[in-house]
Image (cartoon, rainbow, N blue to C red):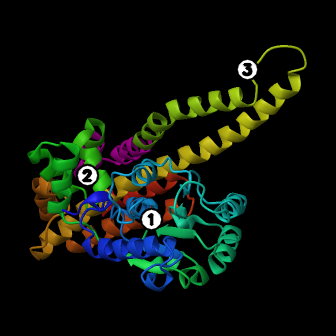
């Protein structure tokens, strides 16, 4: 396994080679060796399939750039604070709603124009950069075209193909393609880094679809395992017309519960901190205006939290739909006798039973219904409508 901060990247040896060389060149630039900076550039675009570790790679690269000795040692204050998300010169944009606004991007670009305060570089990481609105993309483009001397922009796009990022921004970035890690590499990191028992680690790695974060959740969270089981019972559980609505309702409730569980404590904490910061909980004469301002700010925060909850629900639904698509894909693999590995090897019995009941054509129609549902939700169709239409097709074939 790789050492230092690079041990965070699972199964990404080619990317580690590129990024470690760039970090070494960046360190020489800071030290005044301008002729040795060939591997470094001011704008990067990390792409790869879901679970390949785009955001982890971006934070790891930021840590290596802030490393005091320039190699990503993983031990110095620069490495540790960057990885922990507390480094003053590493700014991380994580879309909590459905898009990244122009106002948010303008504020970020303005902050990025300053020289580093405690670190070696000013690093700006934008996760899910495909969610930039047109105005936000234009604001970012100006900064990428004329970057400050010690600022690095790192963009992450959630696909194998970076076409979701505007071509003008893409043309100014160095592309780093990440790959789906192997099951063996994922199991190894679960065992060695997370202390997961070997048998469970190997199971989680085999059913996660190459998604490292999903493997960790399945290995460590009983609720995540139960949610997956409930989703994979759907294909063979659609026996009567009423099952369509029962299964659709179940999927929606799982997503809502997941979003509520993730958001509840965080939302209340944010509201309390905001009221305190604005004096909304204070008492005394003349504080009416402060309280009104605090309540207005809380309402704006609640709107942001609602958008974040919607995104969490959609992400949970999408994971469920990916699991369903994997099931129908496995049925097609079984029907074709191709010998390809199953996405859900632990459901081999159900997959074989489905292959006996369904024709290749009806299985393909079911798979297409799942993929169309994913696309419909992404285009803001109400999830319940999209899910019910999908489940109807799943039953009828």
First reached walking from the N terminus: tag 2 or tag 1: 1
Name the residue beneath numbered marker 2: 215
Residues packed near mark 1 inside 10 Å, few (<14), some (14 to 19) or many (20 plus) = many
Give above or below for 277 relative to 124: above
Q: Position of residue 165 (x, y in %)?
A: 55, 75
Residue 367 visible (yes or no): yes
Name the residue beneath numbered marker 1: 65
Q: Main secondary structure of the magenta part?
A: helix
In magenta segment, residue 99: no
154 on left or right of 183: right
Which quadrant of the structure image shows residue 103? bottom right
At x 30% / y 48%, what residue is drawn? Answer: 231
Q: Which mark is residue 281?
A: 3
Q: Quadrant of the N terminus?
A: bottom left
Dot 3: what SS?
A: loop
- Which residue is most to the top? 284
At x 42% / y 82%, what residue is drawn? Answer: 39
Which quadrant of the structure image shows residue 46? bottom left
Give above or below for 101 relative to 20: above
Dot 2: what SS?
A: helix
Q: Nearer the viewer, residue 129 or 227?
A: 129
Residues packed near mark 3 inside 10 Å, few (<14), some (14 to 19) or many (20 plus) = some
Q: Which mark is residue 6?
A: none
Q: Position of residue 189 (x, y in %)?
A: 20, 54
First reached walking from the N terminus: tag 3 or tag 1: 1
Q: CA distance from mark 3 to mark 2?
A: 43 Å
Q: Position of residue 36 (x, y in %)?
A: 43, 83
Dot 1: what SS?
A: helix
């Amino acid at each position: 396994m790789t050492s230092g901060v690079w041990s965070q990247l699972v199964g990404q040896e080619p990317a580690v080679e590129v990024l470690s060389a760039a970090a070494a060149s960046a360190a020489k630039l800071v030290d005044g060796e301008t002729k040795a900076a060939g591997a470094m550039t001011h704008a990067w675009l990390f792409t790869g399939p879901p679970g390949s570790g785009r955001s982890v790679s971006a934070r790891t690269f930021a840590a290596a750039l802030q490393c005091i000795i320039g190699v990503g040692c993983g031990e110095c204050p620069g490495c540790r604070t960057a990885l922990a998300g507390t480094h003053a010169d590493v700014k991380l944009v994580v879309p909590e709603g459905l898009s990244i606004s122009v106002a948010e991007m303008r504020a970020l670009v303005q902050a990025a124009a300053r020289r580093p305060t405690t670190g070696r570089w000013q690093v700006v990481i934008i996760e899910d950069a495909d969610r930039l609105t047109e105005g936000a993309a234009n604001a970012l483009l100006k900064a990428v075209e004329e970057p400050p001397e010690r600022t690095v922009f790192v963009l992450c796009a959630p696909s194998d193909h970076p076409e979701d990022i505007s071509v003008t921004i893409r043309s100014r970035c160095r592309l780093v393609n990440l790959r789906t890690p192997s099951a063996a590499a994922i199991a190894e990191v679960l065992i060695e880094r997370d202390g997961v028992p070997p048998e469970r680690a190997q199971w989680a790695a085999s059913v996660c679809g190459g998604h490292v974060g999903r493997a960790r959740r399945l290995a460590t969270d009983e609720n995540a395992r139960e949610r997956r089981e409930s989703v994979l019972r759907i294909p063979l559980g659609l026996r009567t017309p009423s099952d369509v609505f029962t299964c659709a309702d179940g999927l929606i409730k799982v997503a809502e519960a997941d979003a509520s569980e993730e958001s509840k404590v965080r939302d209340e904490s944010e509201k309390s901190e905001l009221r305190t910061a604005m004096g909304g909980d204070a008492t005394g004469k003349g504080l009416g205006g402060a309280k009104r301002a605090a309540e207005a700010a809380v309402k704006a925060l609640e709107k942001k939290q609602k958008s974040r909850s919607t995104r969490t629900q959609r992400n949970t639904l999408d994971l469920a739909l990916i699991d369903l698509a994997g099931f129908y894909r496995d049925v097609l693999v079984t029907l074709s006798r191709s010998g390809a590995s199953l996405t859900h090897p632990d459901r081999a019995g159900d997959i074989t039973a489905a292959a006996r009941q369904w024709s290749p054509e009806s299985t393909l129609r079911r798979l297409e219904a799942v993929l169309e549902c994913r696309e419909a939700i992404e285009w803001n169709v109400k999830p319940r409508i999209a899910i019910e239409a999908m489940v109807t097709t799943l039953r009828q074939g």
